Image (cartoon, grey):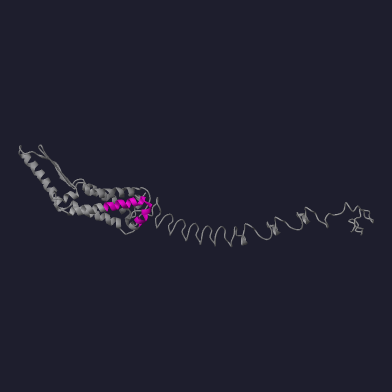
Amino acid sequence: MNCTVCGAVVPDGSATCPVCGANLVLNQQPQGGYQQPNQGFNGQPMGGYQQPNQGFNGQPQGGYQQPNQGFNGQPMGGYGQPQGGYGQPMGGYGQPQGGYGQPMGGYGQPMGGYGNAGFGGFTGSGKFGASPVGGGFTIAKILQLVGAILIFIAPLFNWMSIKMKSGGDKFKEHANMFKLASDEYLDKGVFVFFGIMILLIGAFLICLEIMDFIPSMQSVKQKIVNIPFIEIGIIVLVLLFFILAFFNGDLHDGIKAIKDTIKETNKLAKDNDYIDKIKGHANHGFGPILAWLGVICAAVPRVFRMIGKGNVLDK
């Protein structure tokens, strides 16, 4: 062994150096060469030149790498992927929020299905006077619904009304479209045809308005109103039936004859004391009034859209 102070060769197990007299027991390193049991060279703990928790150039956990950041500064994984798959920020194949080019919904729908803005919104002012699909109650929708109901019930109300009183005698007659076709009145089956057609058109217009409040039926309505002038055409058709019924020759002549009878009887009563006057009326009744109001209510919002003023009532 060598002296730890002067380096002279001394016998193994010597307590002091025979040359310089140094105490070899105090200056001896345990377990061999020059080392520090708890701290390495240059202040590195537990041995040689290394950092167990930090790699070369300040990189943690070993060599040249970043555990939470990829090559070329890309965080969280693959080549240039910030959060997801191949070049996708939030979804697959260029989709920002959904699948295959859909921002929020399926098959080109921004919020709903098949071209519909979704329950609670409008698709626009309505091309060809068509009603907007979806949404809640607006002035236009209220008018259209009221108009459809009035059209539907118009044939069921009186299209001929006669009421007369002479002395102690009373005479009263009321007939809707279906009664006018019977033998008791005009015996004209054409009024049955008018009545059925008007009822069907009224029911169609009512269903068209109700579809707005049934999300599953909005796509069906969208297809219907996309037909050019379908709604305006239906209203023009029902108006034609009303006109034909109102100006029917037999009905018009029958009402006119009763009016003339009342007029002539009252003239005679004026000249003769023994003839009683007739009080009363003869007219078309309440049915035609409902018919005209229904057509107006149903047509006005659609006409406004045709001339580009739909925003006045569609709100």
Q: Position of residue 188 (x, y in %)?
A: 15, 53
Q: Which residues are magenta?
A: 201-222
221 lies left or right of 107: left
Q: Position of residue 68 (x, y in %)?
A: 62, 57
Q: How many marks?
A: 0
For the point 35% across and 51% down, which residue is it? 212
Q: Residue furthest front?
A: 13
Is 252 magenta? The answer is no
Q: Position of residue 34 (x, y in %)?
A: 83, 57
Picture quarter with the N terminus:
bottom right
Q: Is residue 260 above or below residue 115?
A: above
Q: Position of residue 18 (x, y in %)?
A: 95, 56
Q: Main secondary structure of the magenta part?
A: helix
For the point 61% across and 60% down, which residue is it? 70
294 lies left or right of 266: right
| Residue 299 seen anywhere in this rendered image of the structure | no
Q: Nearer the viewer, residue 58 or 274?
A: 58
| Residue 269 seen anywhere in this rendered image of the structure | yes
Q: Nearer the viewer, residue 41 or 263?
A: 41
